[in-house]
Image (tube, rainbow, N blue to C red):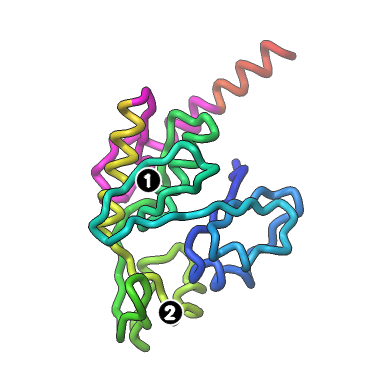
Amino acid sequence: WWPSYYMIHDEVVARSLEPYLHFPPEQEVLAGLGSHASFKHHPATTVYKIPYPASMEGPIEFRTRLEHGLQGGYTVAFAALQMAWYMGIREVYLLGVDIAYQVQVDRTVGDYHAVRTAEGDLSGSYFDPRLSERTEIITLPNEAGMMRALGVAKEFFEANGGRIFNAAPDSPLALFPRKHLGAVLGSATGMDQRNERQTG
């Protein structure tokens, strides 16, 4: 399977990924305001606003009326969970979410960004090693803020009849109940086969 949507939230990551991302014209791309400049020529890009908390310790709200923008929560996963709820998705399986960054910085640039050290190896923090090679200015990972935001998402989903599972086998993120991805995909494949038999 392949994603129906790609979501780009961090403008620094968007600029770094731009040379490598070649989407077909029909591929839906959800781009946060700030990162959308990297994909402004792609015909199927939807831009969304990201109001951030007033401070690093400010309240984090799970938003469901996306015409007013998504709530920033220090991780694209929190934005994606809000978007998923808006789309009617009530059961979510997270892949690759571990909240375990390895970042060495030389100096900070404002509240959210920093210049990494020349010897700083980011390969443990990104899926693609090419990002480690290209990225000098990085977004500072706020792991405490990420955990707060994901906790807000968990509470919202469970209070409103939804569930979030961690389906990454080696992720240290213990906030969500575990579910093996093979079992998830196996049941989906079985359902597709049953539907084919019924309709065939």
Residue on which disc 2 sits: 137
**Region in magenta:** 160-188
Query: Which residue occupies the foreground of this view, 191 or 64?
Result: 64
Q: Position of residue 172 (x, y in %)?
A: 26, 51
Q: Position of residue 33 (x, y in %)?
A: 55, 60
User: Marks 2 and 1, Cα distance to the nearest angstrom?
Assistant: 28 Å
Instruction: Say what amino acid the circle numbered 1 marks.
Output: Ala
Counting labels gives 2
Give the residue drawn at x 72%, y 59%.
42
In the picture, measured across the screen, residue 164 lies left or right of residue 200, that is left
Q: Within 10 Å of the Cα at label 1, are there few (<14), some (14-19), or many (20+) other Cα atoms? A: some
Quadrant containing the C terminus in the rendered view: top right
Q: Within 10 Å of the Cα at label 2, are there few (<14), some (14-19), or many (20+) other Cα atoms? A: some
Instruction: Say what amino acid the circle numbered 2 marks.
Output: Ile
Residue on which disc 1 sits: 168
Task: Please tell me which of labels 2 and 1 falls first in the chain.
Answer: 2
